[in-house]
Image (tube, rainbow, N blue to C red):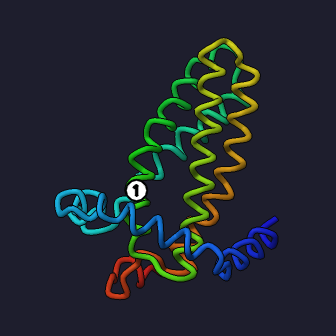
Amino acid sequence: MIKALQQLTERIEHARSLDSVIGFAKKNVGPLTQKPVVKEVLSGEFMGHPLHPLMTDIPIGAWSMSALLDVLGGEELEDASTILVGVGVLSAVPTAVTGLHDWQKTTGESSRVGFVHAAIMDVTVLVYAGSLAARLTGRSTMGKLLGLTGMGVMSVGGFLGGHLTYALGANVEDTSPALRSVS
């Protein structure tokens, strides 16, 4: 499985056919995320490091715990699982906006991987929104199946996000001793 993801990632890195769509997206979204106050908040400058990685923990954690409750819990935990799916969907919106801001600074391979990462994470949010809708309308089995599907899709998107940071060094400054000197 990991080898397949690595091969997929390599193909994405070299998919120059994405460049025109990426250029269009950056040109049209960039002005929204580059206003001084917006940029400072979305970038995490006020914290001294990027905000997006921190933000990802909320939807990933909520959806992971929902999956755990769906698999191991019974009917008495369905409401808690539904709440977690909802928290994940709601928190995914600001998480995506911080990621969009960070993606604006990427180029080449990082930009391509980031674009596909964002698209996969958008699909993840849609699948989880469907899960939430099913759960809220009394179709808990469908909600659980969509939730587990979302977990699978999210795992692929998360792999690409990790690749962006750890393999390609996207949004990691060479001068950042905290990120470069971890032993």
Residue at x-position 35% and y-position 77%: 178
Residue at x-position 64% and y-position 30%: 130
Q: Nearer the viewer, residue 56 or 129?
A: 129
180 lies left or right of 9: left
* Residue 155 percent coordinates (x, y): 67, 54
Q: Quadrant of residue 2?
A: bottom right
40 lies left or right of 8: left
* Residue 138 percent coordinates (x, y): 67, 12
Q: Nearer the viewer, residue 96 or 63?
A: 96
The answer to whether 76 is drawn above or below residue 94 in the figure is above
Q: Secondary structure at mark 1?
A: helix
85 lies left or right of 153: left
The mark tally for this picture is 1
Count residues near mark 1 (Cα–Cα under 10 Å), then give few for <14, some for 14-19, many for 20+.
Answer: few
Residue at x-position 57% and y-position 81%: 109
Return the residue found at the far bottom: 174
Residue type indicated by callout 1: Leu
Q: Quadrant of residue 148?
A: top right
Residue corresponding to mark 1: 54
Q: Nearer the viewer, residue 114 or 77?
A: 114
The answer to whether 145 is drawn above or below residue 59 in the figure is above
Q: Nearer the viewer, residue 139 or 76?
A: 139
Residue at x-position 55% and y-position 68%: 21
* Residue 156 percent coordinates (x, y): 68, 58
The answer to whether 76 is drawn above or below residue 69 in the figure is above
Q: Quadrant of the N terminus?
A: bottom right
Q: Quadrant of residue 101?
A: bottom left
109 lies left or right of 49: right
